[in-house]
Amino acid sequence: MIDLHSHILPGIDDGAQSLSESIEMARKAVEQGIHKIVATPHHLNNTYENPKQSILAKVKELNEALLEEKIELEVVPGQEVRIHGEMLEGYAAGEILPVNHTPYILVEFPSNHVPRYTEKLFYDLQMKGLIPVIVHPERNREVIERPELLYQLVKKGALTQITAASICGDFGKKIRNFSLQLIEANQTHFIASDAHNIRNRSFKMREAFGVIGQKYGNELVYYFEENAALVIGGKHVYKEDPERIKRKKLFNLF
Ligand code: FE
């Protein structure tokens, strides 16, 4: 299994704080059945800078440590970019690091809203051959209140990634139900852990795929697993036309 979103690199954001914590997380990931994990430290969220080159160096170090510990997990480089108006300039300046040097960039919205310039920015990114992957839209307050916003972005080519723990109900029933509705409406393409530690923000991938398999069948589990592999390889992912979330269903959220 591949995990596209994690804060496993030590001491550079609010994820693992030390190398020993990274190694603990790596052991946990392997227990979950993960063999490849994308390290996606925060970029421009709070005080975290984490430009491309420093992430590449840290990934190399962690892979060496895992080899020494005989842990069968490969770390590949990535970044969780807080959305900002100068993303294209940041990419051109070599500060932004897409997943494993592919065209796929993980983009995070502020937790309460979706900036007005998002649609234009995503258009510009796509014109440059880059593909925005919106991370955890199910935890964004404005997306929950106005799901039409996400529908429009997905319709225009953005991809989305839901957090495994959201599907397990760790962020509450409302977020769990909304996550399932996004899946049902073909508005999400990946499930990833966004693991920060092994205590309160752990992997939950196996558990989330358990829920998905039980509710929708294993075909959908394979779909998500396959899509993660396609992203890492820089290939086109599978996607269906998104549908709007039905009003009646939305109402059930509250
Ligand atoms: Fe994250």
Image (cartoon, rainbow, N blue to C red):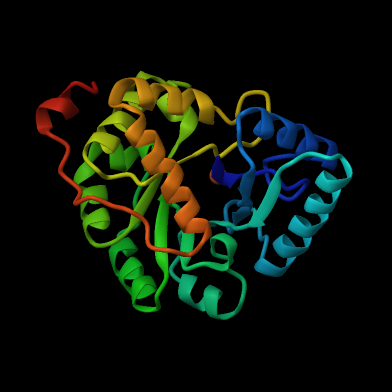
Residue drawn at (35%, 57%) of the image: 115
Question: Residue 117 vs residue 42: left or right?
Answer: left
At horizontal 11% and vertical 32% (from top left) the residue drawn is 247
Q: Nearer the viewer, residue 103 or 170?
A: 103
110 left or right of 8 in image = left
Residue 174 higher or lower than 99, as above or below:
above
In the figure, 130 relative to 188: above or below?
below
Name the residue rendered at 71%, 60% in the picture.
Answer: 55
Percent position (x, y) of residue 41?
A: 63, 52
Residue 137: quadrant of the picture = top left
Residue 126, percent from left and from top = 35, 72
Residue 93, picture quadrant: bottom right
Q: Is residue 108 visible in the rendered structure shown here? A: yes
Q: Residue furthest right?
A: 68
**Left or right: 98, with 110 as reference point:** right
Ligand 1's image quarter is top right
Q: Is residue 228 above or below residue 102?
A: above
Q: Decide if residue 110 is in sight here.
A: no
Q: Quadrant of the N terminus?
A: top right
The residue that appears at 47% across and 68% down in the rendered structure is 103
Q: Position of residue 102 (x, y in %)?
A: 52, 67
Left or right: where does residue 66 sit relative to residue 253? right
Rendered-image quadrant of the C terminus:
top left
